[in-house]
Image: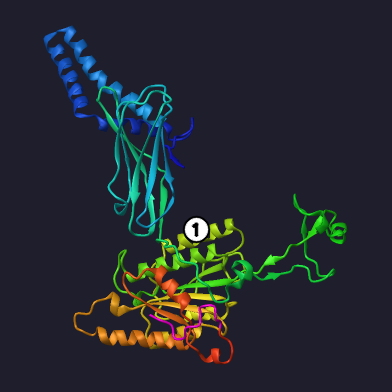
Amino acid sequence: MASGGAPSRGPGEPGERGAARSGLWAAFGGLTTRGRSFLAAGVAAAGCSYVLGQSDLLRVGLLLAVLPVVCVIVLHRTRHRVTGSRRLSPSRVPATAEARVHLRIDSVSRLPTGLLMLQDRVPYVLGPRPRFVLDRIEPGGRREVSYRVRSDLRGRYPLGPLQLRLTDPFGMCELTRGFSAFDTLTVVPRVDPLPPVRLGGEAAGYGDGRHHSLALAGEDDVIPRGYRHGDDLRRVHWRSTARYGELMVRREEQPHRAHCTVLLDTRGIAYEGAGPASPFEWAVSGAASTAVHLLERGFSVRLLTDTGSSVPGPDGMGGYGGSAHDSADAAGLMLDTLAVVGHSEETGLAAAYDTLRGGAGGLLVAFFGELDEEQTMLAGRMRQRGVTAVAFVLDPAAWAYDPRGQGSRARFDGERRLRVLREAGWTALAVTPGAPLADLWRLAGSAGPAPGRDDAAGGTTGGWGGVAGGRS
C-alpha cells in the first residue's frame, strides 16, 4: 500500500510564515463562481451602504463578503488533514489480464469535508482516467473506491499521483490536492501452460529417475550442518559437535538438479512489426512460458539474451532452483525481467555463444528470430557435445506477407536454416503466426535431433524420442 500526504513544515522552520501566506493567497484562486459572486455582491453592498448611509445594508454586505473568505480559510486548513492511499491487487499481472486498484481516503480533520472529486492518473494504455465523486466525509471517517486496469502490452506502468478536489459545504471554494505517492503495475508476458514431455537429460528433475549426490563420502569427508528442530538424533555427528561446541548433523542426500538455459533472441534486425501479435512478443511469451514450466518441473533455469547477459541467480551458472518458494521467486524475477525486455542493438549472437560455451551445459531451449547464414552456423555451434537443444525459429516469410512474391525464396532459406540446425544436433521447429506453443512443445518432445557430428561419436542425448530429422 502506498500512501500520500502533503509535506508540512515543523514549527519554527524558516519560511513557514511565507509559505503559509503564499498558500493561503493561492487558495483564493480556487473560489468558484458562487464564491466570487458572493464576494462581489458583498463589496457592492458595502459600497452602497456607505453612499446611502444604510447601516443595515453594510451588515448584509459584510456577511456576503466574509462568507467566501471564511470558506477559503477553513478549506485551506482542512485540506492538509485528508490522506489518500492506493493498493494494487495484484501488482503483477499477465498481459490481457485485469488488476484492481483500491483507493482509500481518510479524514483526520475535526471538521467534516464537503463534496470530494477523486481522480487517479494512469497511462492511456491501461484505460481511461478514473474519476469518483464522494459525499462529505465525517471527522475521522474514510471512503474506499476501486477501479480496474488492463493492458495488452507488457511493461511497467506508473499509477498516480492521486488528485483530490475539495469543496466546502457552501460551494464557495474548490481546491485541488495532489499526493506525491505512486505505485507501479507490472504487466508480464502471457504464460501458456505446457504439457509434460520427456526432456533429454532430465533424470535429475523428475521422479524416480532422479539422481542423488551424497554429502558424505567418508568419515573424514563429512560436511555437517547445524542441528535443526526435528532432525533425527541418529544423524548427529559427534566429532563435529565437539569441534564446534554445538549439535551438528550429517547432511542429507541432496538431489542433483538439472540445469536449463532459455535463450531469447532480442536483436532488433531479427524481427519485424510491433504490437501484441508481433513475432517478438510471441518469442518473449514463449521464453516466459518455458522458464516457468521448467522451474515447476524442478529445473534450475537461467534466462539468457543475445547480449550475453543473464538473470543472476544463487548458483554458479546463474540459474534458479531449490525449494518451491525459491522457484516461485525465480519465476517472478524472470517475468519481471521479460516484462521490460526490448530489442537490442546487437547484429549477431556472438555474445550469447561465448556465454554458452563457457557454461556448464544442460538443456538448451532457444527462441530465434530471423537468422542469416552466418548466424545460423553460429547458432548450430552453441549446442555443446551431449547437450539436448531445442530451437523455435520464427519463420519470417510466414510472419510478414511479401506482395512482390518473394515468399518462396524466404521459405527455402527458412527450411535451409532448420536443416543446418538439425544437422548440428538441434531439434529445430519453425514457428508460424498463431502457432500454439503447447503444440510445438509436444512436437519437440516427440521429435529427435538429426544425427550430427558428435552424435556419430556417441554423444547423443536421446530424451526427445527416436525420430530423426525433426519436424516443422
Q: Position of residue 155 (x, y in %)?
A: 38, 59
Q: Write the residue at 87% across / 61% down.
A: 239
Q: In the image, 205: left or right of 2?
A: right
Query: Residue under circle 1?
Result: 332
Whether 253 is among the magenta residues is no
Above-or-below relation of 86 to 209: above
Where disc 1 sits, the SS reads helix
The answer to whether residue 306 is seen in the rendering is: no
Q: Nearer the viewer, residue 321 or 91?
A: 321
Q: Quadrant of residue 170?
A: top left
Of 191 and 313, the residue lying toward us: 191
Write down the region rendered in magenta: 461-472
Q: Is residue 221 visible?
A: yes
The image quarter containing residue 95 is bottom left
Residue 324: give x, y in percent of width and height. 58, 57
Q: Tell me where residue 20 appears, x and y as whole percent.
A: 38, 31
Amino acid identity at mark 1: Gly
Classify 10 Å Cα crowding around label 1: few (below 14), some (14-19), many (20 and above): some
Q: Is residue 436 left or right of residue 297?
A: left
In the drawing, does residue 417 fall left or right of residue 308? left
Q: Nearer the viewer, residue 186 or 363?
A: 363
Instruction: Give the colour scheme of this rendering.
Output: rainbow
267, above or below 66, in the image: below
Question: Where residue 209 sits in the image (x, y, percent)?
Answer: 63, 71
Tell me if 433 is positioned left or right of 36 in this view: right
Q: Quadrant of the C terminus?
A: bottom left
Residue at 38% across, 82% down: 371
Decide whether the magenta segment is chiefly helix, strand or loop. loop
Q: Is residue 466 magenta?
A: yes
